[in-house]
Image (tube, rainbow, N blue to C red):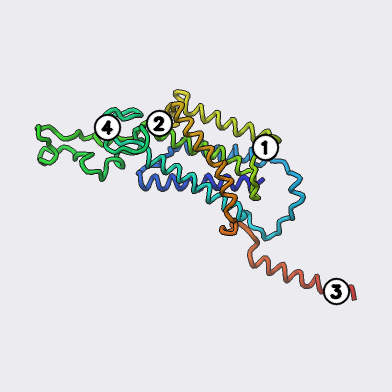
Amino acid sequence: NICRFLQFQLTVNITACTLAFFGAAVLTESPLNVIQLLWVNLIMDSFASLALATEDPTDTLLSRKPYPRDQAVLSQVMVRNMILHSSWQLVVLSFLIFGVGDVCQGSGNVCSGTVYVDYYGPLRSGRPGAYDFAGVAGVCPPVFNASDPSTIGADGLPLRAAEFCREAGGGGTNQHYTMVFNVFVLMQVFNEINARKIHNEVNVFEGIMKNTFFIVIVIGTFLVQVLLIEVPGINTAFGCTHLTQDQWIACLLLGLSVLPLNVLFNMVPPSLFPMAGGGLPPDDDEEEEEEAKPRVAGSKSKDQ
C-alpha cells in the first residue's frame, strides 16, 4: 500500500514541480496559483493516502515471493509508470498552456476584436500579456513618448496607451487557465485508479468495489472539483471561472486518457528503467556477511 501511494504521489510531484518551474521561467508566473496547488496537495497527501493505503490484501499476495531486505522501494515498474504518466501529463498540459488561447485585445473568454495570434480553439489567452505580446512584431506598439516620433501614429495620436500590453492579454479568471487547472486535477484523480496496481497488472479496476474508502474519495474529489469551478465565489477564490459543457467534456476526455494509456505503458519493458529509493548500504551488507560467517562455522563444528 505504501508503494501504491508513493507511485501516485511522486507522479503528481514530478508534474506539478515541472509545470510550476518551467511556467515561472517561461511565462514569468506559474500556470497554477497557490490556492490551486494547495488543493492539489490535499488530493495528493491526505485523500490519496486514505484511498490507496486502505487496500485490502488479495490472494495473489500469498503467491508472490517475499521481498528481500535489499529490495529498492521503487521498483522498475513503478519508476516506469511514474515517468511515462508524468510525461504524458506534461505534454497535454503544455499543449493547453502554449497551444491554446488566442492573443487579442480586450477582456472576456473569447476574442471579440482583432486576433493577433491565432492558436487552436476559440478561447482567449490567459497567459501573461508580457509573454503573448513580446517579440511579435507590430502586435504591441511601443509606449507613448512625446519625444519619440515612432510612438506617434500618422494621425498624431499615441499608438497605444501605457497599459495596453498588460490589459490586452491574460490576468484575472479565464476559461483558458481554468481548463489547465481542471485537466491537471482530473488527470490525477483518474491516475489514482492506475496507482492501485504496481506489478504490471493490466486490469486496474480489479477489486475496486471492495474498497469503499477509495470509491468515496475518488467520487468526492471529483464533486469538489466541480464545485470549485462552477460555484460563484468559490471559483473566484481559486482563480477559476465557469466552464461550458463542451469544455467539461474536453477536460474529462483528457483526464480519462490516462486509463487507456496505462495499458500501452504496461507494454514498455520495465527493464529500461532503473530502480530507486532503497536497498541496504554496502557497509550493512558486508557487516551481515561477516556476522554470518562465525554462525556458519559454529554450526559446522557442532555437526561434527
User: Which numbered circle lies on residue 208?
Assistant: 1
**Of pointers 2 and 3, the one earlier in the residue sequence:** 2
Dot 4: element = loop
Question: Would residue 38 be seen by someone viewing this image from the given angle?
Answer: no
Q: Quadrant of the N terminus?
A: top right
Instruction: Give the Cα separation between the discs numbered 4 and 2.
Output: 16 Å
How many numbered circles are shown? 4
Q: Is residue 290 above or below residue 201?
A: below
The residue wearing badge 4 is: 105
Q: How many angstroms separate mark 2 from mark 3 (CA)?
A: 76 Å
User: Residue 204 lies in what quarter of the image?
Assistant: top right
Q: What x and y, as percent, mark residue 17?
A: 47, 47
* Mark 3 or 1, nearer chain start: 1
Query: Which comes before the other along the chain, label 4 or label 3?
Result: 4
* Residue annotated with mark 3: 300
Hey, what amino acid is under mark 1? Ile
